[in-house]
Image (spheres, helix red, strand yellow):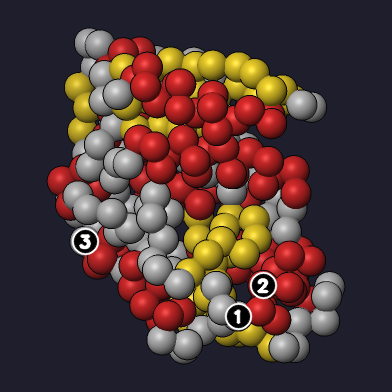
């Protein structure tokens, strides 16, 4: 196959992620085109994700298009993937990861109101800033930063990966990069995942050629841990892996508990099970 149709959300960040995947495939002689799909999460841009609830808010409609063979691959922010992909679909590749950290972007030195629409971020922020008021915040990166600049919040929490990939200038603000100890990232945060049909042998071979093995070493343990936690975006859950050579450190957040564990990369499944037992 020398041409692929990509199914994707239509945000500026999503389209930038499509470009990254397209550029990788082009080097292997594959041209692409993008079909934009609006998901349930896109259609409701007002309510907090924890209030919308459910699994796969930003991917199920895209998966349907893929399953119906109206597209060859789907490009996602890996953090949007639910713990269970649609039957018959698999993750065929991941692109080189951007920074996995969350950023606290600050307008005022006195932080009284912090914006986020994520249950995970809200749970962690309440530990870090127990006196602050948490207010809901949805929208793309530009919308969130505009609301911060307009004074609706003193600070907001945002993923560093999107800032990096879009080249957004944060110089008007103070920026605090949050460590995994301060805020456990979402599973797959900073990773671009490429989904395809399990029976699409030729597509899977072409995706294998562009897969980033180093990123996959982090992606697989995080996905395994997330699967054990079996949570959706209505719950405060984080799953993060730091890989250093043959060593791995895993972080988990589940409701009001968080923990970490370290060991050999080859033992990641056992480490994940131990960690999940601690926090659940």
Give me the residue at 53% from left, 75% from top: 197
Residue 97 appears in the figure: yes
In 3D space, how far apart are the residues under numbered discs 1 and 3 (Cα atoms)? Answer: 33 Å
Q: Give the residue at mark 3.
A: 44
Give the side of residue 185 with respect to residue 209, left or right: left
Whole-Å distance between the Cαs marked 3 and 2? 33 Å
Q: Quadrant of the C terminus?
A: top left
Q: What's the residue at 39%, 49% (across, down)?
A: 83
Judging from the image, what secondary structure is the residue with disc 2 in?
A: helix
Quadrant of the frame with the N terminus: bottom right
**Picture mark count:** 3
Q: Does residue 32 show up?
A: no
Q: Check disc 2 and report the residue beneath it.
A: 204
Where residue 238 appears, x then y in whole percent? 41, 32
> Is mark 2 in CB contact (under 8 Å) with mark 1?
yes
C-alpha separation, residue under disc 2 versus residue under disc 1: 6 Å
**Residue 147 place in picture, x, y as percent:** 32, 43
Q: Label 1: which residue?
A: 200
């Amino acid at each position: 196959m020398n041409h692929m149709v990509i199914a994707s959300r239509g945000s500026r960040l999503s389209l930038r992620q499509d470009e990254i995947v397209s550029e990788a495939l082009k080097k292997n002689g594959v041209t692409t085109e993008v079909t934009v799909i609006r998901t349930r999460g896109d259609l409701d841009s007002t309510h907090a994700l924890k209030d919308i609830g459910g699994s796969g808010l930003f991917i199920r409609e895209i998966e349907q298009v893929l399953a119906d063979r109206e597209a060859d691959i789907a490009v996602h922010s890996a953090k949007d993937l639910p713990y269970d992909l649609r039957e018959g679909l698999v993750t065929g590749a991941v692109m080189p990861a951007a920074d996995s950290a969350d950023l606290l972007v600050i307008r005022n030195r006195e932080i009284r109101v912090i914006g986020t629409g994520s249950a995970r971020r809200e749970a962690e922020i309440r530990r870090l800033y127990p006196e602050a008021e948490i207010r809901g915040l949805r929208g793309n990166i530009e919308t969130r930063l505009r609301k911060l600049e307009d004074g609706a919040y003193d600070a907001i929490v945002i993923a560093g990966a999107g800032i990096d990939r879009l080249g957004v200038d944060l110089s008007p603000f103070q920026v605090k990069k949050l460590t995994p100890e301060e805020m456990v990232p979402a599973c797959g945060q900073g990773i671009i995942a490429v989904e395809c049909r399990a029976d699409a042998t030729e597509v899977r071979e072409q995706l294998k050629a562009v897969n980033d093995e180093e990123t996959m070493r982090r992606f697989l343990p995080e996905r395994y841990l997330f699967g054990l936690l079996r949570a959706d975006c209505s719950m405060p859950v984080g799953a993060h892996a730091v890989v250093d050579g043959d060593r791995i450190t895993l972080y988990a957040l589940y409701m009001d508990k968080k923990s970490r564990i370290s060991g050999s990369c080859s033992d990641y499944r056992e480490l994940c099970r131990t960690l999940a037992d601690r926090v659940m």
